[in-house]
Amino acid sequence: MHPMLNTAVKAARKAGSIITRASFDLDKLTVRTKRQNDFVSEVDHAAEDAIISTLKAAYPDHGFLGEESGYHDRDAEYLWIIDPLDGTTNFLHGVPQYCVSIGLQQKGVLQQAVVFDPNRNELFTATKGVGAYLNDRRIRVSRTDKIGDALVGTGFPFREQVNLDEYLRMLKNVMKTCSGVRRPGAAALDLAWVACGRMDAFWEIGLSAWDMAAGALLVREAGGLVADLEGGEKFLDNGRILATNGKLFSTTLKLLHERT
């Protein structure tokens, strides 16, 4: 395992321990609303602090982008992109579908990825050019080649509902065509599930870089395709992402643009 990935794994497991301990006392948590339908608790902050302190101890010259703390030295050659608790709403309701997500960019290129699901003790990791793994076993995207057979993941545009009409058009097109649609509620974990073949495709609009960075590298290293909804590379900037097993990319992208 690459040394930087190994450090990220340690950081993710520390955060996972904090989250798991807190999950037994949800009624004692202090919860704050950041904006409509977007919540944060002291667990998010504690998990992010643990991640950053672990990474900083090993790599003091690196930059950080955390969901809760924002940018630290954004112009550094190496930038860690961190979601300490992706799926906070699930977590706060006791729904066991959330994760820790840590991605690393070097000069803007994703190099390392960790997505840790503390409920299932599933550790997804990837290094650019080396492959993607689940608990140290190599993973690959699915072989599904017909959209009618595909299980497609998505996420609702819950933060900015100005996108709701556009999203509902996309959802209608996909629902009419594929075998099923799922909305588990943690984008980083959804992307990890595309990487290991549990879902054949995933799309969402209105995401942030920390929701996608690690998961996008996982999908690519597992043999899939990831792009924004124009087929380009700006998904970390515009928050609009499509990830598929590769065989379904063109078909799914066309569906998302169809107007009926």
Image (tube, rainbow, N blue to C red):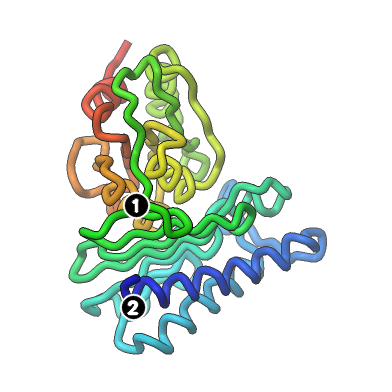
Find the distance from the CA under tag 1 to the CA under tag 2.
Answer: 18 Å
Q: Quadrant where the C terminus lies?
A: top left
- Place of residue 49 in the rendered image (x, y in percent of width and height, measured from the top left): 54, 78
Q: Residue at 37% x, 44% y: name it.
A: 195
Q: Which mark is residue 218?
A: 1
- Image height check: is 202 above or below 15? above
Quarter assignment of residue 62:
bottom left
| Residue positioned 25% across, 34% down in the render | 246
The three-letter code of the residue at mark 1 reads: Leu
246 to the left or right of 175: left
The residue that appears at 78% across and 61% down in the rendered structure is 24
**Neighbour tally class for label 1: few under 14, some 14-19, many 20 plus, Cα within 10 Å:** many
Query: Toward the viewer: 141 or 160?
Result: 141
Frontmost residue, 18 versus 122: 122
Tally of numbered discs: 2
Q: Quadrant of residue 80?
A: bottom left
Under tag 1, what secondary structure? helix
Point out residue 252 in the picture as x, y percentages from the top left corner: 29, 25
- Coordinates of residue 170 in the picture (x, y in percent): 38, 24
Q: Report the disc number at residue 108.
A: none
Up-down relation of residue 70 to residue 134 (above or below): below
Residue 176 horizontal side relative to residue 240, left or right: right
Identity of the residue drawn at 45% across and 17% down: 179
Q: Is residue 209 above or below residue 54?
A: above
Name the amino acid, label 2: Pro
Q: Which mark is residue 3?
A: 2
State the quadrant of the N terminus.
Answer: bottom left
Q: Please identify, in this view, whether the residue under mark 1 or under mark 2 is nearer the observer.
A: 2
Q: In the rendered image of this protein, does residue 205 appear above or below residue 221?
A: above
Q: Secondary structure at mark 2?
A: helix
